[in-house]
Image: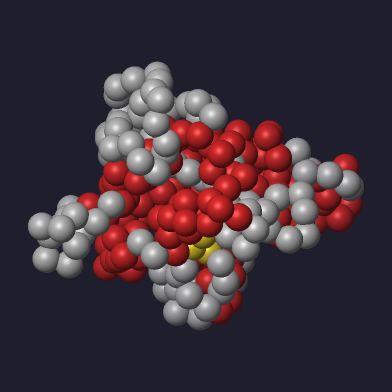
Amino acid sequence: MHCLGSVLLLLLLLGSGSRAGENRCVEAAEACTADSRCQGLRAEYVAQCLSWAALGDCPRARCRRALRRFFARAPPALTQALLFCPCASPACAERRRQTFVPACAYRGPGLAPPSCLEPLDTCERSRICRPRLLAFQASCAPVPRAPDGCPRDQGPRCLSAYAGLVGTVVTPNYVDNTSARVAPWCDCGASGNRHEECEAFRGLFTRNRCLDGAIRAFDSRWPPILQEHLEPQQGPKHSLMQVSSTDGSPEGSSLLSVLPVLALQTLL
């Protein structure tokens, strides 16, 4: 337990001794620490996602539920700053990759990643995951009529939908600390006669120019994001996944073939 306590303390002492601007992810973590709601929800998921170290296991369902609560209920300006903080060094990028304790939340129980068909099939049957993946498809999809293939105002909507996948069976993450490339923890090496479907799913993350562009563009919006949140007078709190519409999802069709819905209800 002493070891676990030390790890928790390390994660929650956010960037002690660093100067603002040197590591944007430290800056984002410090802003979350200064906000009681953000810090409380973050401490909850850190505790759930690291308790496996003491128990010799990973309570993945509890970890992912706590993550969904964090991204749904903490101030969106802060959750997105933690998730998409721009980095210019491997140290910053590694901190960004470790934002939501991926050893439990992102990776599966095996040593090698499973076929992407496994999380995809599980997501299709899940009332939590399915509408979120549909929203991600809709919000980050290229469109032929746009000059670069991506609608001009698409970026923030795409990043919000991407963040909504964190805490589901298809939880994505940065794949290394030298780039901003993202993907779920899976591959398509053993997908058999469904290889094309598998690659199409993985390509939503690895070959999505609109998602890539939205993540890169986040850098240019960085200063106002935290400044606006830290203003003394704040309006009503808004959830990252706070939208109206429906409990259900389209019936009788594949996640990769249906025209995705544009709104979903927060499902925790």
Q: Which is nearer the eye, 12 or 213?
A: 213
Asked whether the viewer can see residue 43, the reply is no
Picture quadrant of residue 256: top left
Residue 98 in picture, x, y percent from top left: 61, 61
Residue 54 in picture, x, y percent from top left: 87, 46
Does 252 sit left or right of 192 as displayed? left
Residue 125 in picture, x, y percent from top left: 54, 29
Picture quadrant of residue 266: top left
Residue 184 in picture, x, y percent from top left: 55, 55
Does 126 sit left or right of 131 as displayed? right
Q: Which is nearer the eye, 239 or 129?
A: 129
Asked whether the viewer can see residue 169, the reply is yes
> Is residue 149 placed above or below 130 in the rendered structure?
below
Does 253 sit left or right of 32 as displayed? left
> Is residue 223 placed above or below 39 in the rendered structure?
below
Query: Which residue is rendered at x = 35% and y = 55% of the image?
Result: 226
Q: Which is nearer the eye, 261 or 118?
A: 118
Q: Which is nearer the eye, 104 or 40?
A: 104
Query: Which residue is rendered at x = 62% and y = 45% of the image?
Result: 118
Query: Which residue is rendered at x = 33% and y = 68% of the image?
Result: 216
Q: Residue furthest top?
A: 247
